[in-house]
């Protein structure tokens, strides 16, 4: 069974700082990769996804992620965070089985 | 907008009680899922369903069962609630996005607001 590892459990940044959240998965075959975000008091929602093609994918609100197959990684990045990016971020992997396995989540706090 | 509606936002039950958590989606999605979310543990899949009257066990099915009598409705049942089932329960639905002909694509999940269950 696949597993997903998010290295940072809690990240605290000041506004305008750059962000990178790590995500690694353990599965040797074809994968589909996701980042979901949960803002305080809101539903979990899709931030971005990778199915195939260009390994650099762009999502909502200026986020992007890069799929590096050789490293089994799908790290999330944003060049300049805002206070409104404070949320919990989840990396997820779907191995074409139609069900996603999630990481433990990373709580991001952005100080104004 | 796809909507996934969970009938109860907050429930408090006693140990041994039977608990029903209801979930309804309004976009004709084939797939429905129940996850539980616990701090530091992320989301863990309890059960899922690809079709009416069909169910598959997820990673932590023990102590739970499900029912899918209609396409739009997926219910999670705790036959005899225990304190270790205190958690946030998330329902999700999905449809396939991509190109099945080249086996490229996946199911993007749309989540409900969650049901926070406390078992005393």
Image (cartoon, rainbow, N blue to C red):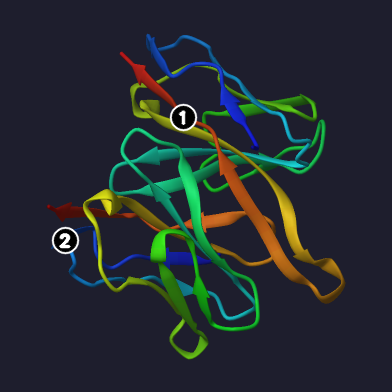
Residue sitting at the far right: B101
Residue in front for this viewpoint, B28 or B1? B1
Image position, residue A24 (x, y; %): 41, 73
**Helix, strand or loop under label 1:** loop
- In the figure, is residue A17 to the left or right of A37? left
- In the figure, is residue B24 to the left or right of B98? left
Q: Quadrant of residue A16?
A: bottom left
Q: In this view, does B105 lie above or below B15?
A: below
Q: Residues within 10 Å of mark 1 (few under 14, many from 20)?
A: many
**Helix, strand or loop under label 2:** loop
Image position, residue B115 (x, y; %): 45, 24
Q: Residues within 10 Å of mark 2 (few under 14, many from 20)?
A: some
Image point (59%, 84%), residue name: A54
The chain letter for the residue carrying disc 2 is A
Image position, residue B42 (x, y; %): 38, 49
Residue in front for this viewpoint, B2 or B91? B2
Residue denoted by label 2: A15
Residue B96 badge: none
């Amino acid at each position: 069974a696949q597993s997903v590892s998010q290295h940072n459990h809690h990240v605290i940044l000041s506004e305008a700082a750059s962000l990178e959240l790590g995500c690694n998965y353990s599965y040797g075959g074809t994968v589909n990769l996701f980042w979901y975000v949960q803002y305080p008091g809101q539903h979990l929602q899709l931030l971005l996804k990778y199915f195939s093609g260009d390994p650099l994918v762009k999502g909502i609100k200026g986020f992007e992620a890069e799929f590096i197959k050789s490293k089994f990684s799908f790290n999330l990045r944003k060049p300049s965070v805002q206070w409104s990016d404070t949320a919990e971020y989840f990396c997820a992997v779907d191995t074409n089985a139609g069900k996603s396995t999630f990481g433990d989540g990373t709580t991001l706090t952005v100080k104004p | 907008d796809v909507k996934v509606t969970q009938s109860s936002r907050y429930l408090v039950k006693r140990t041994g009680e039977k608990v029903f958590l209801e979930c309804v989606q309004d976009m004709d999605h084939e797939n429905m899922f129940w996850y539980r979310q616990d701090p530091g543990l992320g989301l863990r899949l309890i059960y899922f369903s690809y079709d009416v009257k069909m169910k598959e066990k997820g990673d932590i099915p023990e102590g739970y069962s499900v029912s899918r009598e209609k396409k739009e409705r997926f219910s999670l049942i705790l036959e005899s609630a225990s304190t270790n089932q205190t958690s946030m329960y998330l329902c999700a639905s999905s449809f396939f996005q991509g190109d099945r002909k080249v086996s490229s694509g996946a199911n993007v999940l749309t989540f409900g607001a969650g049901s926070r269950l406390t078992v005393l």
